[in-house]
Amino acid sequence: MLENIFLTVVKMSITASIAAIIVILLRKLAGKKLPVTFSYAAWVIVLVRLLVPFSVQSDFSIFNFIKFPETARDGALWASGPWDKSASQYSADAVDLGRGNSISIIDEAKSTADGNMYISNSVMNDGPEENIHTDKAGVSGEKGPVTVMACIWMSVFLVLLAFCTYAHLKIIRSFKTAVLFNDNGLLAESAGRLDLRRKVSIYISDKTDTPVVYGIANARIIIPALFAGDRYGKELEYVIAHELVHIKRYDNITRLLAVLALCIHWFNPLMWLCFLLYQKDMEMSCDARVLSAYENDIRSEYANTLLNIAVKQNTLLRGVVPAFGESNIKSRIKGIMKFRKNKAWAGIFAALLLVVLAFVLLTNGKNDYIAEIRSAMTRNNIISDLLEHRSRYIGNASNAGNLLNKLPYAGNKEGIKLDTGSKPYGITVNYRLDDIDAVNEDKLKNAKPVLLDNALILFSLIENVDIVRFNILPSNTIVQFERAQLQQYFDRELWEYSNSKEDFERFLQDIYFEIYINPGKYSPDMSSVPGMGISITLNKEFYNIAHSIKFSTENGSLLLKDAETGQITDHGKMLDVTLASLEQVYWSPADMDESVQDNIITISVLKKNGDIIKSKSIRIGKEDSSSFTVVPSYDITADVFPRTGGF
């Protein structure tokens, strides 16, 4: 949970940094030609990016054109995920993204409550004693690097938040003694000049040396006791006008949000710079608004007022509440003396530019490269964890047991047995799956793809294992896989797929793309179904960025059956289905040339931008003049739909 929050914050910080860089460049390049209010308003875009974890997608987003370095996927420093050592218990429960459709994602990761797993499994008491292994190994609660960084981030965040909260509460307590100030009509005059209709009160206090805005819902202006005298009449007028601008723009609220954002993103040095620039632009734009509210030139008088008040400042107020005598006095004085009232066209252009910036910077791209990076980081950790157990020999029972602890059904494992006396060498794994029995073929078929994946991973990581048997308890049903049997479906030796991270990732991505065909044998005479139903399951860690599925057929037609109405639509040779679709895909041999003896259906998993992540093919052979059968393959399960798929 904490890791996910931290990674989300990192993503927000990255997008906000890109927005901030653009704002800083515009501020630098066009700052003199645009109203100073533009720079201040542009910081709101950065603030939204820092605080809002979601956004809509748009073709206009800058994130369509910014691609993050591919080397990020190799950053083991960031790698963390459900296959981390601190989360070593798995199940093969399916999470259906389509709410009942034929396309689902298998979520194979479930950790124990405290992140640790302690196993004391039963001994298989048949066979030679040296070949029997009882799992009594505890997987330590060692935390991954992302978990450590997340804990550090949260700790510093809480400390900063506590400090800022303390400072704010201290200000609130100090202002409780403030008394209502008789402004002799200055407040109403300034509010009218600024077209402010909100109810505002002015209080006087000896706890502050500079005017500030205090409160959230009911904003008040707090002025120092030195303004009680009549000699500060004109200066007091400018001060009140300045603070009213803050109130009208709700600076007292955005300032607190900016402080909160800084506490959250404390690890990003660019955000500290942005906070300083934001404060500077806020005050300078406020000064400009006050100057523009007067018909006569008050620049000198206003600058003198700022200098007089800046002599005495309460540093505790800086960054917490808007105050008249802020820092950056030199820049503000220069800005005041160079001030010229903006022409109408400049204001219109600045407003249009802000709208464009909002569309470009506040929307996400159609290509979510940050999601790709995060997915790649998680995969990197999974792959590294599994490759730790790569071995040429099956005889290391502890290694084999720990490897199985990182695979689906680990929580159901009740001991293993190694057959190392003579070839063929094998491993037998006890899995307790109470809902499966020998007579329930459908339930066993649903479990077989998971068992097959586990067997393939064992064959790829342990070179001399020839047979993998799974003993399903309590029914004692044996499911067996042989290396030679599965090798025929692969171009390379299974062992060679674990030679490198890149090869092993492609291998896992391949085996975690599973196809279900129901029925496995079809004839147009079958009235119960319109064709061969095609479903797929995708492992969510390896297909996290999958968006849609593309089906194409060389012969016959592809059909869609609406889940609600039952209406069937013929899409010809090609169709696309999103992961959120409720429609079932079928292949029908209708209108197929009688001379054609087989057919190839290609299934491609696509990203949001249409790029192919992975493609697989189904071969359908013609048995006789009226029946068609799917050609067996390791990744095809016939005559069954996945548990969360179907019609």
Image (tube, helix red, strand yellow):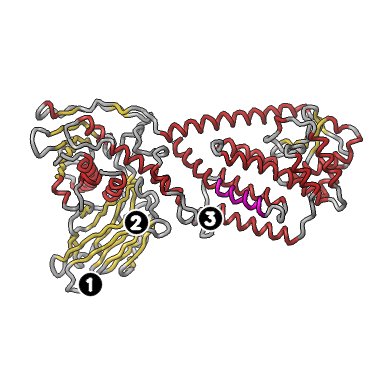
In the image, which disc is placed on residue 98?
A: none
Q: Is residue 586 left or right of residue 346?
A: left
Residue 62's tag is 3
Q: Quadrant of residue 531?
A: bottom left
| N-terminal-most mark, 3 or 1 | 3
SS category of the residue bearing label 3: helix
Q: Is residue 479 above or below residue 22?
A: above
Residue 208 % position (x, y): 77, 30
Label 2 secondary element: strand
Q: Residue at x 26, y 38 (%)?
A: 409
The type of residue carrying mark 1 is: Met
Q: Are marks 3 and 1 in contact (CB under 8 Å)?
A: no
| Residues tagged 1 and 2 counted as in contact (Cβ below 8 A) | no
Q: Residue 163 lies in what quarter of the image?
A: top right
How far apart marks 3 and 2 lie (CA) works out to 25 Å
Residue type, numbered disc 3: Ile
The front one of 203 and 229 is 229
Main secondary structure along the magenta-highlighted residues: helix
- Asked whether residue 529 appears in the rendered view, the answer is yes
What residue does disc 2 label?
605
Residue placed under numbered mark 1 in the picture:
592
Disc 3 versus disc 1: nearer the observer: 3
User: Which span of residues is magenta-colored?
Assistant: 16-29
Residue 17 located within the stretch drawn in magenta: yes
Q: Amino acid at mark 2?
A: Val
Can residue 247 be seen by looking at this rendering? Answer: no
The local crowd at label 3, few if under 14, some if 14 to 19, many if 20 or more residues have their Cα within 10 Å, is many
Residue 618 in the image: state x and y as whole percent.
Answer: 23, 60
